[in-house]
């Protein structure tokens, strides 16, 4: 068991993004507790544009702190349908409530392939355990 | 223990706009009747109100004089800033460049009426080329990053001319300054990061694996940002050349080599200088600087326009048709270049090498005195700068805390958190300007901090305690940016 | 050598502590073959009195500094109040470093925060940065910024009447990034962008960049260019190379500019043969995170005191590296401080007076040339302190003759616009007396002939 919060209904990437299945191939994306704890005081979040076509290899989102700039790797190919408008006024929510109000954006995909390719919560938890050991 | 460089004066000075009073005047212009002058322009081309302060001359002078007392400065004390080469700014340079024969010369003056400045420019082009081991040099770029942009642009133009358009990548070590990859991106190149080895250097096998016909070249800082000289440099440049690439040298660390060795002799094809580092021109609180670029013979035709030439003792400008293009208006920061010119001549061929020798001596002395108190990640020999880190600091004392604690002891902090390959980096470059007493006092202060980190960490963690403001909220400044004063 | 304090005995002590025999040992990582074996081929060392003499002699060869000058074209001779140089000669300003450590740099930080405020007010734009190298690079970066904002469009439109050095610089910076650069050609009657050319502004246009007053001194059709640009959803980028013009002329903010740039050399900074000046860069608040260059922001410290810091640094090269908004690191800090001090000194009324004096002189000179000499005014329309005349002879011949009379008569337009072979661009500022303007006209009459 790692020391981080890993909700069991989500799937995760190796670069610490989480994805939630909202049904009908629509997915919500955010950063995990591990990432939130390591990133520091967030000053700004650059989100993709609504209706932007995104693929699972690209960087469409970026989290800034005073001293750093972290690229968020998109995990689901499709079209961006919603972005979290709260973050423009309160970017710090991403750090404070990364699985709840701190979600980033939602993508409408045409399949569940990308989602299935991600790690399950258990697999990610183990992955974090191994990271901590290094 | 002495505390050099601190001021006791701690006034709270308002913004100049807060000192403004309607009807106050601070300027002097000849009397002239200007009634009706504004109707020379039709109303739709005129602005409405102009929101600038109304203050008297005394207000302006007091305001800026007070503001100046809030600054630490080189004339006040020691700046051990790694990678910045904060050496003394000679006063003779300041005086001589203010000669109106130089300041009052318009850049479009026909060259026959500007032979003094053109001669200086020609000589500077020549001397900087000689100092670096290059065939020619341009004075156009206005800062180091501008020089990098220009130098990489020269590389781009070279391959465009040879038709070798497959070369879209440039190799950059992970220890490089952020301007290096940014300058490549600005020129349309893709960056390939080369991971430094356990000595903090470029590993030849790693380099070999990255070289191919898609690589335009490599950007190297030598000595690198750890102060470590790439002793395989001849092999490195040979490998890159054999793969068809060019070698760009970031001259930020030229102070380690000045008058002792020349990058051009090591296989560097193009290099930028920082006149505001190596050649003593003042930093001015963030500029102006100058970033002249030296090139090997085959790259001369790609230097940006214009370029000063001499024919039969007459100086003029020449344009090359293969030039990479203009990089700014006119000819560069001439006011800055003039200061560096005087600096080089004051040292002359007899003494220029003593800068590097003393700079390297001073840095190694600090290293020898502090290595038992601060952690050194890399064990390699270093030249003019040394990088410690906070990894062995007790009681959660970080590099940031050490920096702030140094402020309380009368020093500007060293460079912190750079290079990125050393976590919690503390980069110290004393330069040749500092006396042994200054170095010893600084060393004493650093040892005191290391000791207090163990015995009285609150003293360090709460620093600075002696300045007018302490630990500004940078997160707030970035979340809710307030970038100008607004009237309530 | 006076700048090297280490003595021989101190050197010995230090070498002992380090554990090497000589300083040369410290250079052992260098390959032996690259160590210099003979002195560099540069002149012999000079003392301060010798340096003074040398600079004095060299200065005498710059007779252009002593001639009556009407040169403009992007660099302007204005009156610089004595106190500006006095203040920036304070070593706390000029020998200090970039203000990365805010607790020891509040002087610089506050001075530049005030600069940002004054430039934003001068341009009537939301935000101004802490300076760029010069107007040309500021213009180039503005186009790059526009390109980053308008990701779905491909065409950049630039007025052919802008400063030609700025155009060259923009091309250098954008040639392989921007798909298409098209010029908006000049109307030969007005010296401004021809109205018909504005039809080129369409839904594929990223931005429309133009200069006012333009290279010929003329003020472009601000309202029309602004309206058509915004209608097409393109970004409006005006360039102001003569900053004192904004003492009286309509501002970029008043025409809803998206990004507005220029050069502040005219604000109390001597010409110095073209540099250092100070690049000005402003934009609308919504674009601030794509802006290049440093920005200083207000905040509070842990005791609640107002203070200033470098902010929004995540845009810059030391953090975003190859994804940065620009590669710029050092800017023109001290010159921004100087421009700020000038604006504070001249103030609301003084800058306006300077601008009106410039307007009056150009108007006086233009009218006199037209009525008393064989030269014509090239273009109909409004100008600020610069305008173009057409001579009944080759422009270079004309200027050569002026030179023989000790006058720098202006810039031959054909230097950059070869088709305009008898056009000369003339500038006048508040430093000229009306007597000097008369002297210009008398010389022009002698060289080119009197009015017919």
Image (cartoon, rainbow, N blue to C red):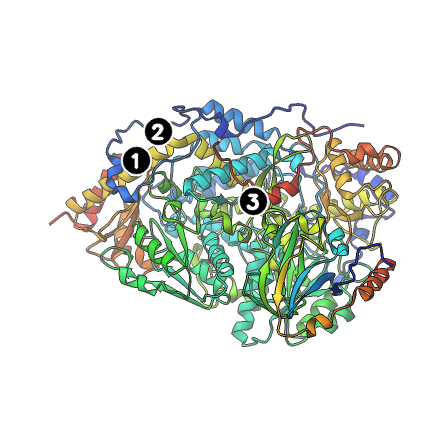
Q: A120 and B336: which one is in front?
A: A120
Chain for disc number 2: B
The disc placed on residue C357 is 1
Q: Position of residue C330 (x, y in %)?
A: 58, 47
Say whether marks 2 and 1 touch (CB < 8 Å).
yes
Residue matched to label 3: C295
Residue at 24% across / 40% down in the picture? B40
The residue sitting at the left extreme is: C452
Mark 1 falls within which chain?
A: C
Which labelled disc corresponds to residue C272? Answer: none
Q: Are marks 1 and 3 on the same chain?
A: yes
Say which of B45 and A113 sits in front: A113
Figure check: C304 above or below B244: above
Q: Is residue C354 visible?
A: yes
Q: In the image, which disc is placed on residue B29?
A: 2
Judged by depth in the image, the label closer to the viewer, 1 or 3, is 3
Query: Residue B454 placed where, x, y %?
Result: 88, 37
CA distance separating discs 2 and 1: 10 Å
Q: Is residue B285 left or right of residue C242?
A: right
With respect to residue B78, does C159 lie above or below? below
Both marks 2 and 3 on one chain: no
What residue lies at 81% left-to-right and 43% top-to-bottom? Answer: B365
Q: Is residue B102 left or right of residue B80?
A: left
Q: Quadrant of residue B170?
A: bottom right
Return the residue nearer the eye: B271 or A108.
Answer: A108
Indicate the quadrant where residue B463 lies: top right
* Quadrant where the image shows the N terminus of chain B: top right
Asked whether the residues under the numbered discs 1 and 3 touch, taking CB atoms below 8 Å apart as contact, a structural biologist would say no
């Amino acid at each position: 068991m790692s020391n981080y919060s890993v909700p069991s209904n989500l799937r995760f990437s190796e670069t610490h993004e989480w994805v939630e299945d909202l049904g009908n191939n629509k997915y919500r994306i955010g950063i995990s507790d591990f990432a939130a704890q390591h990133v520091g005081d967030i000053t700004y979040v650059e989100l993709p544009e609504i209706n932007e076509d995104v693929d699972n290899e690209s960087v469409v989102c970026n989290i800034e702190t005073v001293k750093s700039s972290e690229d968020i790797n998109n995990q689901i190919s499709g079209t961006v349908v919603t972005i979290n408008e709260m973050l423009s006024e309160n970017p710090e929510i991403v750090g404070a409530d990364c699985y709840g109000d701190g979600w980033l954006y939602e993508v409408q995909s045409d399949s569940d392939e990308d989602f299935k390719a991600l790690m399950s919560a258990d697999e990610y938890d183990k992955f974090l355990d191994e990271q901590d050991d290094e | 223990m002495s505390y050099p460089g601190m001021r006791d004066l701690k006034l709270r000075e308002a913004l100049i706009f807060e000192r403004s009073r309607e009807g106050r005047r601070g300027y002097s212009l000849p009397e002239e009747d200007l009634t009706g002058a504004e109707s020379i322009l039709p109303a739709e081309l005129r602005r409405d109100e102009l929101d600038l302060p109304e203050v008297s001359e005394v207000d302006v002078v007091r305001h800026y004089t007070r503001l100046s007392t809030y600054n630490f400065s080189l004339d006040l004390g020691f700046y051990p800033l790694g990678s910045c080469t904060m050496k003394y700014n000679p006063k003779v340079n300041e005086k001589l460049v203010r000669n109106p024969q130089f300041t009052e010369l318009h850049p479009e003056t026909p060259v026959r009426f500007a032979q003094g400045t053109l001669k200086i420019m020609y000589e500077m082009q020549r001397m900087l080329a000689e100092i670096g081991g290059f065939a020619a040099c341009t004075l156009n770029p206005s800062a180091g990053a501008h020089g990098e942009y220009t130098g990489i642009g020269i590389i781009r133009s070279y391959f465009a001319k040879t038709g070798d358009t497959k070369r879209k990548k440039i190799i950059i070590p992970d220890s490089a300054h952020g301007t290096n990859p940014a300058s490549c991106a600005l020129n349309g190149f893709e960056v390939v990061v080369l991971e430094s080895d356990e000595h903090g250097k470029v590993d030849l096998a790693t380099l070999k694996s990255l070289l191919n016909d898609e690589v335009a070249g490599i950007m190297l800082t030598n000595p690198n940002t750890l102060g470590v000289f790439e002793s395989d440099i001849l092999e490195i440049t040979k490998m890159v050349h054999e793969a068809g690439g060019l070698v760009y040298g970031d001259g930020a660390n030229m102070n380690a080599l000045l008058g002792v060795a020349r990058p051009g002799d090591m296989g560097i094809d193009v290099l930028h200088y920082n006149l505001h580092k190596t050649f003593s021109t003042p930093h001015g609180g963030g500029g102006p600087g100058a970033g002249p670029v030296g090139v090997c013979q085959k790259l001369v035709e790609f230097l940006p326009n214009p370029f000063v030439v001499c024919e039969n003792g007459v100086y003029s400008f020449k344009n090359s048709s293969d030039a990479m293009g203009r990089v700014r208006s006119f000819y560069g920061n001439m006011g800055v270049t003039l200061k560096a010119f005087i600096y080089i001549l004051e040292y002359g061929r007899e003494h220029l090498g003593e800068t590097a020798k003393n700079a390297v001596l001073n840095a190694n002395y600090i290293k020898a005195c502090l290595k038992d108190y601060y952690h050194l990640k890399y064990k390699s020999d270093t030249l003019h700068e040394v990088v410690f880190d906070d990894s062995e600091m007790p009681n959660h004392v970080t590099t940031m805390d050490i920096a702030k604690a140094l402020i309380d002891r009368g020093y500007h902090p060293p460079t912190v958190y750079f290079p990125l390959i050393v976590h919690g980096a503390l980069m110290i470059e004393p330069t040749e300007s500092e006396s042994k007493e200054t170095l010893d006092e600084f060393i004493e202060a650093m040892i005191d901090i290391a000791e207090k980190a163990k015995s009285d960490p609150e003293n360090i963690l709460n620093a600075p305690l002696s300045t007018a403001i302490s630990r500004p909220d940078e997160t707030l400044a970035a979340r809710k940016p307030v970038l100008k004063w607004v009237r309530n | 050598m006076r700048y090297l304090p280490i003595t021989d005995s101190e050197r010995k002590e230090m070498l002992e502590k380090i554990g090497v025999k000589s300083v040369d040992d410290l250079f052992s990582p260098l390959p032996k073959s690259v160590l210099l074996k003979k002195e560099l081929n540069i002149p012999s060392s000079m003392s301060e009195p010798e340096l003074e003499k040398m600079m004095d002699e060299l200065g005498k060869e710059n007779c252009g500094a002593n001639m009556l000058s009407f040169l403009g074209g992007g660099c302007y001779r204005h009156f610089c109040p004595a106190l500006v140089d006095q203040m920036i000669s304070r070593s706390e300003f000029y020998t200090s470093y970039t203000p990365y450590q805010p607790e020891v740099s509040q002087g610089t930080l506050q001075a530049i925060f005030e600069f940002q405020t004054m430039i934003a007010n001068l341009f009537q734009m939301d935000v101004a940065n802490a300076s760029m190298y010069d107007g040309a690079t500021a213009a180039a970066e503005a186009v790059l910024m526009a390109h980053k904002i308008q990701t779905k469009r491909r065409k950049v439109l630039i007025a052919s009447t802008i400063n030609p050095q700025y155009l060259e610089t923009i091309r250098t910076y954008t040639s392989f990034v921007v798909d298409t650069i098209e010029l908006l050609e000049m109307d030969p009657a007005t010296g401004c962008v021809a109205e018909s050319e504005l039809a080129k502004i369409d839904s594929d246009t990223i931005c429309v960049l133009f200069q006012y007053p333009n290279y010929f001194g003329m003020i472009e059709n601000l309202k029309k260019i602004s309206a058509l640009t915004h209608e097409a959803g393109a970004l409006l980028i005006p360039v102001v190379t003569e900053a004192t013009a904004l003492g009286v002329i309509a501002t970029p903010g008043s025409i809803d500019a998206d990004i507005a740039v220029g050069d502040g050399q005219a604000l109390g900074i001597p010409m110095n043969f073209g540099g250092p000046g100070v690049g000005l860069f402003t934009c609308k608040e919504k674009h601030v995170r794509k802006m290049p260059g440093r920005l200083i922001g207000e905040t509070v410290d842990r005791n609640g005191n107002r203070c200033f810091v470098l902010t929004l640094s995540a845009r810059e090269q030391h953090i975003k590296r190859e994804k940065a908004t620009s590669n710029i690191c050092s800017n023109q800090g001290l010159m921004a401080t100087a421009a700020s001090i000038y604006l504070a000194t001249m103030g609301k009324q003084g800058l306006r007076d300077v601008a009106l004096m410039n307007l009056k002189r150009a108007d006086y000179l233009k009218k006199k040339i037209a009525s008393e000499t064989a030269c014509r005014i090239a273009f109909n329309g409004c100008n600020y302190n610069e305008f173009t005349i057409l001579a009944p002879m080759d422009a270079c011949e004309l200027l050569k003759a002026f030179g023989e009379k000790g006058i720098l008569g202006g810039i031959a337009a054909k230097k950059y616009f070869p088709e305009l072979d008898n056009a000369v661009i003339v500038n006048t500022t508040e430093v000229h007396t009306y007597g000097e303007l008369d002297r210009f006209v008398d010389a022009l009459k002698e060289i080119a002939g009197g009015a017919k």
